[in-house]
Image (cartoon, rainbow, N blue to C red):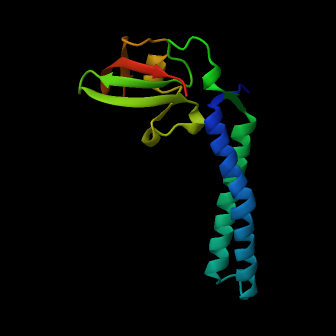
Amino acid sequence: MSRAPITARGAAKMREELDRLKSVDRPQVIEAIAEARAHGDLKENAEYHAAREQQGFIEGRISELESKLSNAEVIDVSTLAGKDKIVFGATVELLDLDSDEEVTYQIVGDGEASIESGLISISSPIARALIGKQEGDVAEVEAPGGRREYEVVGIRYE
């Protein structure tokens, strides 16, 4: 299995969530299950069933995070060479040539992408179109909504 790239900040956020799930959320749900069990008949005990469902969610999320972290290749973007070109981890300022709107994205691994936070996956169409570009270049993106053009206004590595 190939290792998935992830930024150091993304890995740290995953580790924080994993620690919280293991040290805070898991003990709380175990306590809630024990308390609900004490109320008697488990077949008709909604609190017990809700707590067990929550426990399943927590355990699933813990497994998911452990798997992602064990298969991740953490890349410290501040140490990357060739900072005049867009590569993994770059934060890019773009001008949408169709709408004259400026947007800022950071190119991150698939597991940490969140468009609401301005984090786009390395495998997304826009990231693939931007890789290797420099300031002033225009990137043509084949997006689901049609072809878009973005001018690279700035590149930085944080």
Quarter holding residue 75: top right
Residue 109 image position (x, y, % from top left): 58, 31
- Above or below residue 8? Residue 86 is above
The foreground one among 21 and 44 is 21
The foreground one among 101 and 128 is 101
At a point 66% along the width and 38% down the height, the residue shown is 11
Residue 4 image position (x, y, % from top left): 66, 29
Return the residue found at the far bottom.
Answer: 40
Q: How many numbered marks have been drawn onto this rendered protein structure?
A: 0
Residue 88 image position (x, y, % from top left): 56, 22
Q: Is residue 103 visible?
A: yes
- Above or below residue 56? Residue 30 is below
Residue 63 image position (x, y, % from top left): 72, 49
Return the residue found at the far left.
Answer: 99
Q: Quadrant of the N terminus?
A: top right
- Residue 103 vs residue 129: left or right? left
- Residue 151 vs residue 122: left or right? left
Quarter holding residue 134: top left
Q: Is residue 145 visible?
A: no
Q: Quadrant of the C terminus?
A: top right
At a point 46% along the width and 20% down the height, the residue shown is 155
At a point 26% along the width and 21% down the height, the residue shown is 97
